[in-house]
Amino acid sequence: AQSVTQPDIHITVSEGASLELRCNYSYGATPYLFWYVQSPGQGLQLLLKYFSGDTLVQGIKGFEAEFKRSQSSFNLRKPSVHWSDAAEYFCAVGPNNNDMRFGAGTRLTVKP
Amino acid sequence: EAGVAQSPRYKIIEKRQSVAFWCNPISGHATLYWYQQILGQGPKLLIQFQNNGVVDDSQLPKDRFSAERLKGVDSTLKIQPAKLEDSAVYLCASSPRTNEQFFGPGTRLTVL
């Protein structure tokens, strides 16, 4: 069965600092992996996805993620966080674009 | 391009009452999804439509939840009767065939 674990419920970083959000997955084959962002009162927006090829994936808003098969991880990173990045971040895994299982999310707070 | 539209944005009802949510997907998107997002959790897929046919409704509580997608465009999700544990945000998403999902802003349901 597929599942996603986001170990950090809440993370606080200072504006301008680097960010890494963790995501671990359980899946029987090479999965499709996604990161979504949800701002308050908004729907989810896709930041990036991986399904094959280069294991370092570039996304929108300056985010990137690295697929590490040996660690079953797909961590999201950003070198310098902006106040507008404060939101809820969800990692998801699935066999394709249509059948995703979401993690519980990590809430990001950005300190001035 | 207009996004996924949902209404109402907020709804408060008493337990045992009925409620319906409406979703208008992005024009031309064949696939439509309904998700339930309980506070503190990631979205959970309730039902997936391909045009006006159901692809996956394995996680839809069919004793109280129903959904339809007439003419393969708009969709409604109904709960009858509602329970306290149905309090959640109900998200609608749509996608072109086998491609990225685009999410609406959601309907926040509170059951008292």
Image (cartoon, coloured by chain):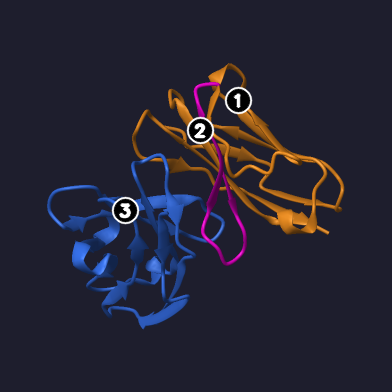
Chain colours: A blue, B orange
Q: Is residue B83 left or right of residue A51?
A: right
Residue at mark 3: A28
Farthest residue, direction left: A54
At label 2, the amino acid type is: Leu
Q: Mark 1: few, some, or many residues within 10 Å (few <14, many ≥20)?
A: many
Q: Nearer the viewer, mark 3 or mark 2?
A: 3
For the point 24% across and 62% down, which residue is it? A65
Q: Secondary structure at mark 3?
A: loop
* Image coords of residue A63 (percent x, y): 26, 62
For the point 42% across and 76% down, which residue is it? A8
* Image coords of residue A2 (percent x, y): 40, 55
Chain designation of label 2: B
* Image coords of residue A71 (percent x, y): 24, 69
Chain designation of label 1: B
* Image coords of residue A26 (percent x, y): 36, 61
Looking at the rendering, the stretch of residues picked out in magenta corresponds to B35-52
Chain designation of label 3: A
Does residue B79 appear in the picture of this structure?
A: yes
Instruction: Compute the Cα span from label 1 to label 3.
Output: 33 Å
Instruction: Compute the Cα span from label 2 to label 1.
Output: 9 Å
Residue at mark 1: B69
Residue at mark 2: B32
